[in-house]
Amino acid sequence: MNGLMMDQPLLVKSIVEHAQLIHPDVEVVSVTADNPRHRYTYREAFRRSRQLANVMAGWGLQQGDRVATLGWSDHRHLEAYYAICTSGYVCHTINPRLFLPQLEFIINHAEDQWVFVDRDFLPLAEALAPLCPEVRGWVVMTSADFMPETSLPDVYCYEPLLADASDSFRYPQLDENSACSLCYTSGTTGNPKGVLYSHRSTILHTLVSMLPNVMNLGGHEVVLPIVPMFHVNAWGFPYSSPLAGAKLVLPGSKMGDGRELTGLINSEGVTLSAGVPTVWLALQAHLRASGESVPSLKRILTGGSAPPLAILEEFDRLGVESQVAWGMTEMSPLGTANAPTLLSPEQTTEAASKTRLKAGRQVFGVELKITGDDGEELPWDGEAFGNLKARGPWVCSSYFRLEESSAHAEPGWLDTGDIATIDPDGLMAITDRSKDVIKSGGEWISSIDVENAVLSHPKVAEAAVIGRPHPRWGERPLLIVVRDRGAEELGADEVLDFLRDKVAKWWLPDAVEFVDELPHTATGKIHKVGLRETFAEFEF
Ligand code: ADP
C-alpha cells in the first residue's frame, strides 16, 4: 500500500522560491575585481538570475545542454549557477587551475555551448577559444566599465546583457532526476572524469549538509566558504546558505590571501567558514604575523586533505571550533563529518588528538564500507586498512560519457580510491590514496599519519611521504620536507628523532630529503605522482 503523500519533485528552483519568500533580505557579499565589497540580498540575487535565465532563453539551447562557468566565487557566478540549472540546462563549473590540455578536453567532452568567464581568466579563455570551436559564445562576468579588450570571438559583457532583460521568468517543470550541474575531477592520471549531479541529488545533499551533526547551518550564521565555486559546488554552500537563510560571503579571487580573508571575516562578522588545510595555513600565518584576531569566527570545517594537528590546535588557541569532514567530487562532495557525540569515550589528550583528526562518521544517506584486495568486507575495528567504498543518493553512479571505470567495478558501490580504517563507533580515518600507499614487507604504512606527525615539528612548513623501491622490503618510505622560513639548520636526524615516539618504529622513513617547495595539484593537494617522478632515481 502506498502512502498518501504528494509527489513533489526535488528541484533547485525550490531553494530560490523558499529563500525569496522566507528570507529575501539576507545579504550576499562578494569580492569582485570591479567592487571589493559588492553587497545585495537574496531577493536581488534571484531577481537577476531570472533576468539571466531570460537572456539564455534567447540562445536557442535545448534542455540538458551544458553551459560552463570559469569564475571565482562571487555574486555573478551565483546568479549563473541558478539561472542555468533552473532553466533546465546543466551548469558545468570549470576549474581554471587545470592545465590547458585538460581544459580543452573537458570543454569539448562536455560539449559546452556557452561559457561564462571571469575577467581574470580572459587570457585562458582566449587560449581555449580556438581549441573549442563548438562553443557558441563567451560572456565576461563584469560591468561595461571594466570590460577589457579581448580577442575572444562572439563575446558579450555580463551587465549590459542583463540590463534590458525582464525579471519575470517561468521556471520549466523538470524531472527531479534531470541533470543540474557537472564537475570534472582533476585527474592526476588520465583524462578528467565528469560527475553529473541531478536536481534530486543536489537537494538531498543540501538538506543533509545542514544537519547539526554535519555543518549545523542555520539562519544565525554568516558563512564564508573559502572553497571555490568552480570545484564540487563549493561544498554545497551556494545551495545550503540561501536555504538556511545564512548570510553568504563570497571571497572572489582572495581565497589564499590571509590578510584579505581576515579583513572579510572581521568586516562581515563571519561566524562559520570552510576550506582546505592550505587556506587555514595562510589565514593563521597572517594572524600570527599581524597580531590581528577574528573574534566573530566561531567554527571552521576543514576537508579536501588531511589536516595537520597544528592547524586545529592553533584554532583552539584562537577560540575557534574546528571540525574535519571528508568527501570528494564524486560525492557532491559530502561523505563524513567528525562531529562530537555524547557517547564519545573519555580519552587521554593524545587519543583525543588522534580522534579529532579522523575524517568522521558517515552522514545520514551515505553508506561506507572497507574491503580487502579480494573484495571481502573488513571489520570496523580501527585496525584493518581497506579500500573505502561508498553509496548513497548523492554518490556518482557512473561518469559522464565514460562507459567503464574501475571506480564502479563493484556494482552499486563507488570505489573512492582512498584507503581507510573505521573504528567500532563508526569513525573513519583516511590513511592514504590507494595510488599513494606504501607497502613495506606486505604491510601498509599510512603516509598521512607520518606526514601529520612531521608537520607538528615547529620548523617544518610542509611534508610528504612517498614509497620508493627497497631491495628487502619491496618499498620503504622516503620523507620529503620543506623547512619553515629561517629554519635552514633543520637536518634529517632532528626530524627522525622527533618522529621516533610518534609513529610505529617500522613506519619511520628510511631517508629524509629537503626541497624548497612541493608540487601541488589543481585543487591544492600535494602532487605525489609528480614527486615520485622527481625522486624516480632515488635509492636508499
Ligand atoms: P581532486 O582534488 O582530485 O579533484 P576531490 O576534490 O574530489 O578530488 O578530492 C577528493 C579526495 O580528497 C578524497 O578522495 C580524499 O583522498 C581527499 N580528502 C578529502 N577530504 C579529506 C580528509 N578530511 N582527509 C584526508 N583526505 C581527504
Image (cartoon, rainbow, N blue to C red):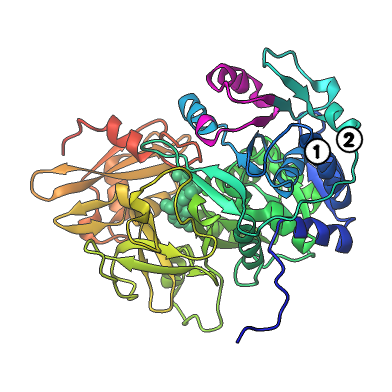
Question: In x, y percent, where is residue 102?
Answer: 47, 30
Residue at 85%, 40% in the rendered image: 51
Q: Secondary structure at mark 2?
A: loop
Q: Which residues are magenta?
A: 108-137
> Left or right: 353 with respect to 473?
right
Sequence order check: which comes first, mark 2 or mark 1? 1
The residue at 60%/33% (across/down) is 112
Res 318 → quadrant: bottom right
Cβ atoms under marks 2 and 1 closer than 8 Å: yes
Q: Which residue is mark 1?
A: 52
- The residue lying toward the viewer, choosing from 286 and 223, is 223
Q: CA distance from mark 2 to mark 1?
A: 7 Å
| Residue 118 forms part of the magenta stretch | yes
Residue drawn at 31 percent across, 39 percent down: 491
Left or right: 388, with 229 as reference point: left
Spot occupied by residue 506 in the image (x, y as percentages of width and height): 20, 57
**Residue 130 sits inside the magenta stretch:** yes
Rendering coords of residue 237 (x, y %) = 68, 54
Q: Is residue 529 left or right of residue 36?
A: left
Determine crowd level at label 1: few under 14, some 14-19, many 20+ residues with C-alpha closer than 10 A.
Answer: many
Q: Position of residue 131 (x, y in %)?
A: 53, 19
**Circle 2 residue:** 165
Q: Label 2 crowding class (10 Å Cα cut-off): few <14, some 14-19, many 20+?
A: some
230 or 397: nearer the eye?
A: 397
Three-letter code, disc 1: Leu
Q: Residue furthest bottom?
A: 1
**Residue at horizontal 66 percent and vertical 25 percent from the top:** 136
Is 60 rendered above or below residue 425? above
Quadrant showing the C terminus: top left
Which residue type does callout 2 highlight?
Ala
Look at the picture and state if 115 lies above or below 370.
Answer: above
Ligand 1 lies under 8 Å from the Cβ of mark 1: no
